[in-house]
Image (cartoon, rainbow, N blue to C red):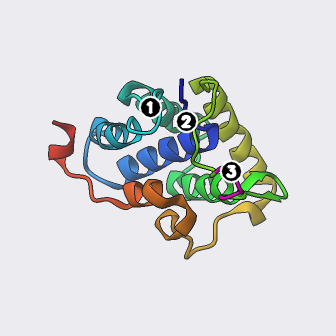
């Protein structure tokens, strides 16, 4: 069994939600597009799972009545991509592995959303965790196929 790393699922969910909020397409279109490509690498990246992650992130932000979901999502992605945990930079390549390699255990949606919720509260207390204004996920060279997927244009036809 090959499962998606938790940090990658979180980033995908946040990107889906961010693009949905800032665009005019249904959320399902983004989920379909990302799921098709991610399923080539991981078994647990179904449309339903990605949609559930994104929707639960959006619901949480609505509950706390925060007005800038895009900024929260961007900062969450920045921190998940650049750090394994607070204060420890993520190593994308080691001698035998890459950060994109599958993991052995499936990560539940609840755990990913819990990580997002915790980050939002931490960000409120520590504004220095906000993503730099010019940071873009697509510019992270070591993310290979994932970065290019997140940067691809999405159209209504991707949902068909």
Asked whether disc 2 touches disc 3, contact meaning CB atoms under 8 Å apart, the reply is no
Dot 3 alpha-carbon crowd within 10 angstroms: few under 14, some 14 to 19, many 20 or more: few
94 left or right, relative to 148 = right
For the C terminus, which image quadrant?
Answer: top left
Question: Magenta region, mostly helix, strand or loop?
Answer: loop
Element type at marker 1?
A: loop
Q: Nearer the viewer, mark 3 or mark 1?
A: 3
Q: CB of mark 1 within 8 Å of CB of mark 2?
A: yes
Sequence order check, earlier mark of 2 and 3: 2
Q: Give x and y (percent) for residue 156.
A: 17, 46
Residue 96 lies within the magenta run: yes
Q: Residue at x 62, y 58 (%)?
A: 75
Residue at x-position 52% and y-position 30%: 56
* Residue position marked by numbered label 2 in the rendering: 4
Q: How far is mark 1 from mark 2, CA to CA?
A: 7 Å
> Is residue 34 shown left or right of residue 80?
left
Q: CA distance from mark 3 to mark 1?
A: 24 Å
For disc 3, the marked residue is: 96
Q: Image quadrant of residue 9?
A: top right
Q: Please rate how many residues cluster around mark 1, counting C-alpha atoms within 10 Å: few if below 14, some from 14 to 19, many from 20.
A: many
How far across and down, in percent of the image, does residue 137 sit? Answer: 51, 63
In this orientation, which residue lies closer to the viewer: 74 or 9? 9
SS at badge 2: loop
Quarter occupied by the N terminus = top right
């Amino acid at each position: 069994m090959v499962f998606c790393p938790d940090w990658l699922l979180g980033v995908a969910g946040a990107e889906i939600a961010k693009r949905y909020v800032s665009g005019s397409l249904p959320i399902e279109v983004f989920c379909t597009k990302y799921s098709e490509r991610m399923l080539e690498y991981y078994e647990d990246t179904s449309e339903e799972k990605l949609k559930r992650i994104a929707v639960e992130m959006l619901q949480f932000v609505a509950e706390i009545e925060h007005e800038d979901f895009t900024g929260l999502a961007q900062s969450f992605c920045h921190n998940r991509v650049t750090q394994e945990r607070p204060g420890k930079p993520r190593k994308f390549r080691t001698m035998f592995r890459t950060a994109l390699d599958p993991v052995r255990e499936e990560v539940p949606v609840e755990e990913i959303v819990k990580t997002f919720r915790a980050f939002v509260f931490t960000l409120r207390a520590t504004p220095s965790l906000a993503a730099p204004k010019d940071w873009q996920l697509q510019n992270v060279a070591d993310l290979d196929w994932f970065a290019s997927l997140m940067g691809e244009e999405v159209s209504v036809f991707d949902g068909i």
